[in-house]
Amino acid sequence: MNKSILTTIVIILIVLNGCGMNRRGSSSGPTATISEQELHKGFDGLTIEFPENYPPLEVYEGDTFPVIVLLENAGASDLKGDISILLNNNVRLTKGSLEQDIELKGKSIASPEGEREIIELLIKPFIFPDTQSIGSTIIAQVGYEYKTSAVVNVCIDTDPFDELLAKGIQKACNKEDIELQDGQGAPIAVTKIITKINRNNNIPEFEIFVENKGKGKLYDLDEYPDYVDIEASLYDKKLICEDDEMSLEEGSYIICKPEESFEETQEPYISLLNIKLSYLYVETINKEITIKNKKRLREKKTPSI
């Protein structure tokens, strides 16, 4: 390996470790405490980036150069997946692997920063002898399993016409739509919940709205490219949803409800609605580089006699 390249990689790893990033593992050093509620905020799952100059914007044919990919699980769910590095025909891998499995733990109270990993490769570019320079694209793509967990207080308003108030009885709560704007520490987020009471059978129904708030997209799963798996429960009782999958088309929602109705004499009460989403997600980044022909550049600089 070129000695200067080896030195460069060692330097960047030392810098990253100094900032609390291990080559593989959770961040080290002192960390601030974080609450369970704060863990489940935001719309990040996996974050992926090329550090500046790795790869460099310009390289010369025949000279090996480093490619480094930084991965961080910035969400609240553990993830398992794989990373693929995609190269054009004018560059060739000389060290490392273009495909690797990854497993990264998410944020937790014990570890407020999710697990991180550094992927390192060495690449050698090529160019036609009569070409002065050519562009090339390096792509890093990660597909991974992820989960979203939303826990919300909902009002089960068994008295939508305020008959109790007419009798002078104060209700414990009033039904209202719930907007969830802060996310749940995952790219796929529950954004809105509408509670209704079916007066025909006294069963509460929950309209659950879900959106892709992340920078990536769901895996293209054959005929169901925009669906996520869903489970829901009201406190400890499982809810029956219209399907075990729901679409993420704009404005779409799914209805979930208990199997059994409540007693007609049941007064309004507050309960916990638990929603769990499971899905496959993909994040992609790319970087354009320019490969230059050293021989043509030397010829260009050499004055003719």
Image (cartoon, helix red, strand yellow):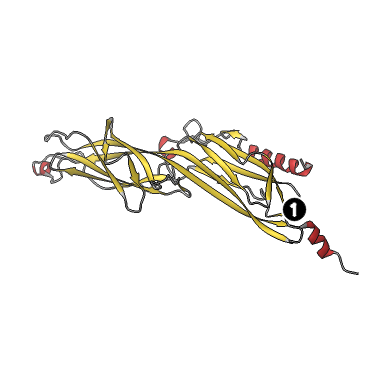
Q: Position of residue 142 (x, y in %)?
A: 53, 43
Left or right: 156, with 50 as reference point: left
Residue lying at 42% horizontally and 35% vertically, measured from the top left: 36
Where's the C terminus, which quadrant? bottom right
Left or right: 93, with 155 as reference point: right
Residue lying at 76% horizontally and 61% vertically, measured from the top left: 130
Where's the N terminus, which quadrant? top right
Q: Quadrant of residue 129?
A: bottom right
| Residue ranking furthest to the left | 167
Pick whichever, 135 or 10, lies toward us. Answer: 135
Residue lying at 49% horizontally and 30% vertically, measured from the top left: 110
User: Is residue 305 placed above or below 15 in the rendered structure?
Assistant: below
Q: Position of residue 80 (x, y in %)?
A: 50, 35
Residue type at numbered disc 1:
Glu
User: Which element type, helix, strand or loop, lies under badge 1?
Assistant: loop
Residue lying at 34% horizontally and 41% vertically, measured from the top left: 245
Which residue carries the number 1 mark? 61
Pick whichever, 126 or 216, lies toward us. Answer: 126
